[in-house]
Image (spheres, helix red, strand yellow):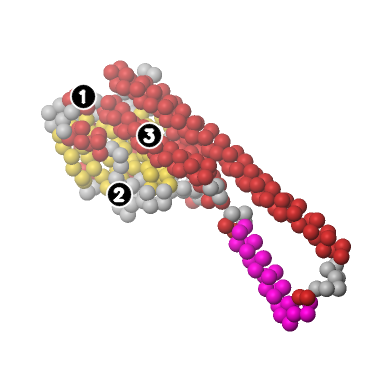
């Protein structure tokens, strides 16, 4: 799990709109790809310079410009200048700790969203920020790294699916948001599987690792919730009808995305309640286990109390004690004490009492 806050000291004292990359550098060099299409034509290419994107601004076709890697300031500056993006928008693009939001300008709409992905190697959830600029005939997406969840959308465009090829940029924006929300369900399935595993471990043999797993899951769910919760408001504003760039036919699909967003949030709330209950169950299990140990030790102590009383009362000072005359009595008693002590330690260890 990455840290919640990153250092922002390098922006201290700088005027608003100053471009400074805040976040982890995830790629060595930014990569720019362009998809341009209409009902009959399709073009996909990777460009070497940002200037090759400029002619697509005024084309009548739908253009999707995707930039992987947002740490190169000169690329962001040139894109912003040519497409008339506000300096504060460019600043938000380069700040990977930005809260998901939607800003409506006269001729374009700006969105910030979070894309979660599951890292199999560390069994943790990572968050990538994506910024989207919706124009009349173009969409510009800014991502932190290469490889994303939008390949199905690219395939639909490439294969000439009627709906997406006959629609405008607003429908393409819906398709991208829908892909992000669908990915949320994949992450929720991963979290659900981990919760089930921890819950099973909690019922059978809870230990310190179980407590660590519960705390890790609670932290991940909280961080995931922080990234998803504002999405409900974003989608609601898109489908409400106040944005001129979103056409009425597309709003119907956005309502469906809104319903999916509510499902994601409800599932996260359920997970959070389950983890809180699991933490209480863990504490109860540890308390019950401690009580069980104390019960056994109390029984042992109760048995030996009268025996200790009798031995202490007489002090074992009897006249006829043949073992007192044995040559090896003392070493044997020491050996017996050591064997009993080791046996009890082994027994307690096997019972997992310490």
| SS at badge 1 | helix
Q: Identify which residue, 205 or 276, lies in the foreground.
A: 205
Q: Judge left or right: residue 65 versus residue 114.
A: left
Q: Judge left or right: residue 250 versus residue 18.
A: left
Q: Do the residues labelled 2 and 3 touch (CB within 8 Å)?
A: no
Q: Judge left or right: residue 69 versus residue 208.
A: left
Does residue 170 show up magenta in the picture? no
| SS at badge 2 | loop
What residue is shown at x 12% (from left), y 28% (from top)? 40
Within 10 Å of disc 1 (Cα), the crowding (few <14, some 14-19, many 20+) is few
Q: Judge left or right: residue 236 versus residue 46.
A: right
Magenta stretch, overall SS: helix
Q: Disc 2 designates what residue?
A: 30
**Res 348 → quadrant:** bottom right
Within 10 Å of disc 3 (Cα), the crowding (few <14, some 14-19, many 20+) is some
Q: Disc 3 designates what residue?
A: 185
Residue 244 position (above or below residue 326): above
Label at residue 163: 1
Within 10 Å of disc 2 (Cα), the crowding (few <14, some 14-19, many 20+) is some
What residue is shown at x 48% (from left), y 42% (from top)? 200
What residue is shown at x 27% (from left), y 47% (from top)? 31
Which label sits in the foreground, 2 or 1? Answer: 1
Residues in magenta, as a range = 324-348
Q: Identify which residue, 14 or 73, lies in the foreground.
A: 73
Can residue 283 be seen here?
no
Residue 163 position (above or below residue 222): above
């Amino acid at each position: 799990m990455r840290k919640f806050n990153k250092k922002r000291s390098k922006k201290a004292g700088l005027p608003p709109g100053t471009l400074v990359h805040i976040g982890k550098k995830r790629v060595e060099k930014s990569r720019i790809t362009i998809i341009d299409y209409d009902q009959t034509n399709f073009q996909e290419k990777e460009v070497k310079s940002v200037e090759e994107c400029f002619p697509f601004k005024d084309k009548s076709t739908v253009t999707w410009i995707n930039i992987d890697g947002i740490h190169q300031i000169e690329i962001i500056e040139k894109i912003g200048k040519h497409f008339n993006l506000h300096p504060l928008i460019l600043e938000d693009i380069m700040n990977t700790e930005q809260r998901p939001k939607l800003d409506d300008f006269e001729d374009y709409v700006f969105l910030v969203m979070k894309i979660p992905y599951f890292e199999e190697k560390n069994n943790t959830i990572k968050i990538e920020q994506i910024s989207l600029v919706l124009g009349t005939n173009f969409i510009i997406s800014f991502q932190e790294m290469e490889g994303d969840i939008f390949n199905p959308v690219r395939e639909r465009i490439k294969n000439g699916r009627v709906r997406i090829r006959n629609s405008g940029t607003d429908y393409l924006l819906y398709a991208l948001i829908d892909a992000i929300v669908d990915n949320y369900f994949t992450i929720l399935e991963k979290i659900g599987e981990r919760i089930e595993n921890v819950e099973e471990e909690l019922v059978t043999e809870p230990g310190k690792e179980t407590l660590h797993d519960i705390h890790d899951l609670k932290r991940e769910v909280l961080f995931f919730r922080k990234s998803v919760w504002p999405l409900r408001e974003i989608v609601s504003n898109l489908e409400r009808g106040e944005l001129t760039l979103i056409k009425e036919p597309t709003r119907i699909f956005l309502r469906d995305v809104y319903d999916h967003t509510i499902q994601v949030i409800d599932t996260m709330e359920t997970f959070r309640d389950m983890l809180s209950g699991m933490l209480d169950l863990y504490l109860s299990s540890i308390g019950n286990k401690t009580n069980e140990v104390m019960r056994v030790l109390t029984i042992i102590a109760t048995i030996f109390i009268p025996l200790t009383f009798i031995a202490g009362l007489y002090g074992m000072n009897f006249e006829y004690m043949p073992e007192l005359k044995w040559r090896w009595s003392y070493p044997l008693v020491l050996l017996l004490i050591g064997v009993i002590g080791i046996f009890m330690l082994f027994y307690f260890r096997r019972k997992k009492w310490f």
